Amino acid sequence: MKLSHSQGQLQTQSPLTSAHIAQTMTLLYMTSAELLQTIDVELSKNPALEAIPERRCPMCNRKLPATGPCPVCSQPKTMDPDETIIFVSPRDDFYSYNGTSSTSFDTDRPEEPFSSENLDLPTYVLTQVAPELEKDERALAAMILTNLNEDGFLAIDIREICRFHHVTPEKVEVVLKKIMRCDPLGVGARNVQEALLAQVEFLSESTQVPEFVRRAIVDEFDLLSKHQYGDLAKKLGTTTQKIKLVSHYISDNLNPFPARANWGTFRQPNDNTPEVFHQPDVMIYYLNNKPGNPLVIEIITPSRGTLRLSPLFKKALKEQDGEQAEEWKKDLDKATLLIKCIQQRNNTMRQLMEQLAAIQKSYIIHGDVHLQSLTRAEIADTLSVHESTISRAVANKTVQLPNKKIIPMATFFDRSLAVRAILRSIVENENHAMNDTELCASLEERGINVARRTVAKYRSMEGILPAHLRKLEKFATA
């Protein structure tokens, strides 16, 4: 049977090109909503790509009805009541097929599409740096931006980027310098020192930077970071008072953790801010919405129909020659690559959720206490992929559980969640207000060994008051 290029085409066994891997990694990092935006952009600018108004299953390529999932892939394969059904589903409305809205939309979201409030950090930076990049620098920038940690630092060695793209370190450094000049200044730096220096160099182009600021960062950063102003003054041959002015300038004008400028606070990453999730990337529910039935895991792949290579464009390309044909061929290659990379993304997400569903099934059904200890490295080892692939697949994604609660996919790897749930239960059932040492001992009785300071941290995360305040609270309500 002859297969055409489409989203439903099966993955070939030929080796993946660098461009294929790079774009797949970029798409893998995106949420469903972000991927839908990317598809819309490509459809608007690439004449070789088109979306036909028919829905096909991304897994088996069957033509689908106007609404609803694939009638084959969404059904049990066996009579085993414990079987979990996992399938990829094309949709652009983000509503569950049983008629229940998966979420409510927030009308107060920012209207500016490229504001820092409306984008994740890599996308926000990419919108700024893209016009500055040469064609051969784009893949390097994508790899850098998809490997930023929560502080905005580059989390991989540039030698890994060099090996992956077969370029020199100097080439990567050029791209890195362009990225570090974007807002937030210093993003992409490898450490605090490099981030501060990038900010100083940028600011010095338009404003007066106090004497000794650059030297303190470059030559005596260890003394500066330890606030050893007397020793630092001696090293730089100046007064302690001037060094204090240097420290004040750095505190007032520089950010040692670039990503925390808009994605957190000066001292902590943005992990305590209540999050509003607008549409899930994965939906988990019971078959026919009946508890006790097999779990159904629906992985959303955004759709405007079925993507394919335009037959008219391919026909016109055959009639062209020379420079025009070369340009059109590039458009055709880009469209082909996008279709293949979306399919690869779907395959990776399906394999990931298959593992998570098997390991964390009790948590999905019964709640926080049943969450199993799990790392991204363990999943990567099982699937024979790099840990960074799993990190990208998990990043920014959300999952709707059978109870309709939407959680970050990263929750499946949260080692503290089960312990915090048990801690919450202990406090809810305590006979007297237990202090952190007593709570620590109570956890140990349940086979959970954590330090007292960890108990205090978990208690704070759960919004549980200290013992003396809980005692007052109980007295006030008695």
Image: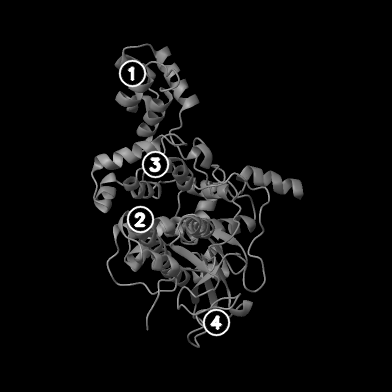
Residue under pointer 3: 153
What percent of the width, then of the height, locates residue 14? 28, 69
Quote the CA–CA distance across marks 3 and 1. 29 Å
**In the image, which is nearer the foreground, mark 4 or mark 2?**
2
What percent of the width, then of the height, locates residue 287? 58, 79
Numbered label attached to residue 324: 2
Q: Earlier in the sequence, mark 4 or mark 2?
A: 4
Numbered label attached to residue 295: none
Quote the CA–CA distance across marks 3 and 2. 42 Å
Q: Amino acid at mark 2?
A: Gln
Residue under pointer 4: 71
**In the image, which is nearer the foreground, mark 3 or mark 1?**
3
Quote the CA–CA distance across marks 1 and 4. 73 Å
Image vertical order of residue 413 relative to residue 128, above or below: below
Numbered label attached to residue 231: 1
**In the image, which is nearer the foreground, mark 1 or mark 4?**
4
Asked if the residues shown at circle 3 and circle 1 are in contact, with their CB atoms under 8 angstroms apart, the answer is no
Q: Earlier in the sequence, mark 4 or mark 3?
A: 4
Residue at the spot 46% in from the left edge and 32% down from the top edge: 255
